[in-house]
Image (tube, rainbow, N blue to C red):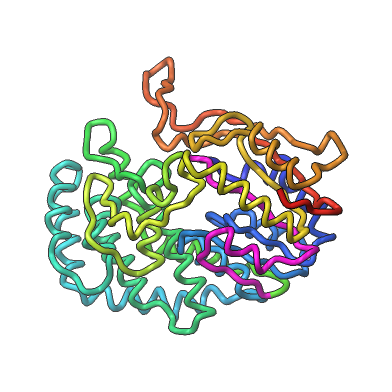
Amino acid sequence: MGSKRFMLSNGLGDLLREQLPYANRFIDPFCGSGGVINFVAKNLNFKGEIIAGDLQKYAVVLARAVIGRTKVFDAEYLKRAWIEKAKKKLNTSKLLNKANGVDQKYSGKIKLRVNAARKLCKTPSKIGPVWRAYGGHYFSPKQAITIDYLLNTLPKQTKYRDICLAATIIAASRAAAAPGHTAQPFQPTAGAGKFIEIAWRTDIFKSCDSALKELVPLHAKVKGRAMVSDAKKLIPKLKRGDLVLLDPPYSGVQYSRFYHVLETIARGYCGEVTGIGRYPDISERPQSEFSNAGQSYKALEQLLSGLSRKKVKVIFTFPKGKSSNGLSGDKVIELAKKYFNLDKNKSRIHKHVIGRFSTLGGNNKFNKHNREKKSRVKSEELVLLLKPKKTYESR
């Protein structure tokens, strides 16, 4: 799983700068963590509407926090009205005293601390979902109850609620005691225990304040929309003159497995959780056809066919080699040529971008020096510019 942050500084950003001036609207139906949308809002003077979509609500919240407004908010006002309110409520909590007691009693004894934390977080709480589902696992008891109080005191006004919820998601993602995603938390072993100690020292309130200060300057020139939606359902909303960014999943494992903690925070609720990863039931984890090897090719063809009929221009990013969902760069290009004209400028038909991508623990490659699994590997990614054909032939 890759980050668009590297690609934006190495080809994709230049292509967006080149193409957006000719677009009426910009649509990102696989918006993920909102990296591209933030880039457009921060670096490009785009005056058209931005529409974002994703199967996961946390992604939509992050997108809407930026494109859902057209002006800078006051971070200090939000801190006073929200974070300070959450602090006051938290300080009255009996669970906070018990959480602090665990931290003090087992300081420096991570295995005992984790066991005590997990036992404590079985104590019922009506404040929010994080304490019960993830306390003692991804978060310390104090962090878990803090996140719940932040959710409990979110502003009622939608325009403020979106950005504060986004800041909570960002703070939680940075604090989670997990290896770069939230598929599974670190366990209190000799090797991983130190990472739990480091993660559990993160001050959630300070992290939220920092996230707010990063978010408030980012906004759209024209108020945009963000929605939880399958990419194909956005097709009827498209018009000639739109520029669409396609960055579909290329993992054979559902992405919702890796971000279920952030999804719980975005939704504000969670059913029963099970296993080491503390997974909610699969019915609470969105499923994409693109992460199913038996459905991915058909899903891509239907998507490209629908986009072609709408006569939109497309920027498509995908790994050059074979991906675990059964698709590959060659298959993507084959389908792209069927429904679109690839840019005639051969130097831009497909830019190869070399980056480092998370394996999400799903590989058997090891560092030769310490025999530890490589968490990130080099990957070559295509950036395709697809232009509508003059006439569309149904196939």
The vertical placement of 321 against 102, above or below, is above
Q: Is residue 94 magenta?
A: no
Q: Residue at x 64, y 32 (%)?
A: 320
Q: Residue furthest bottom?
A: 157
The vertical placement of 142 against 116, above or below, is below
Residue 87 in the image, given as x and y percentages of width and height = 33, 73
The vertical placement of 201 against 150, above or below, is above
Please name whichever residue, 301 or 173, is drawn nearer the observer in this view of the structure. 301
In this rendering, position of residue 204 left or right of residue 383: left
Q: Residue furthest top?
A: 368
Residue 335 in the image, given as x and y percentages of width and height = 68, 41
Q: Is residue 224 magenta?
A: yes
Please name whichever residue, 86 or 274, is drawn nearer the observer in this view of the structure. 274
Please name whichever residue, 388 or 67, is drawn nearer the observer in this view of the structure. 388
Residue 387 in the image, given as x and y percentages of width and height = 80, 50
The vertical placement of 60 against 111, above or below, is below
Residue 34 in the image, given as x and y percentages of width and height = 57, 57
Magenta-colored span: 223-251
How many numbered marks appear?
A: 0
Q: Residue at x 41, y 16 (%)?
A: 369
In this rendering, position of residue 294 left or right of residue 19: left
Write down the quadrant of residue 355 in the picture: top right
Residue 45 seen in the figure = no
Please name whichever residue, 155 or 97, is drawn nearer the observer in this view of the structure. 155
Q: Residue at x 31, y 68 (%)?
A: 269
Q: Residue at x 25, y 55 (%)?
A: 140
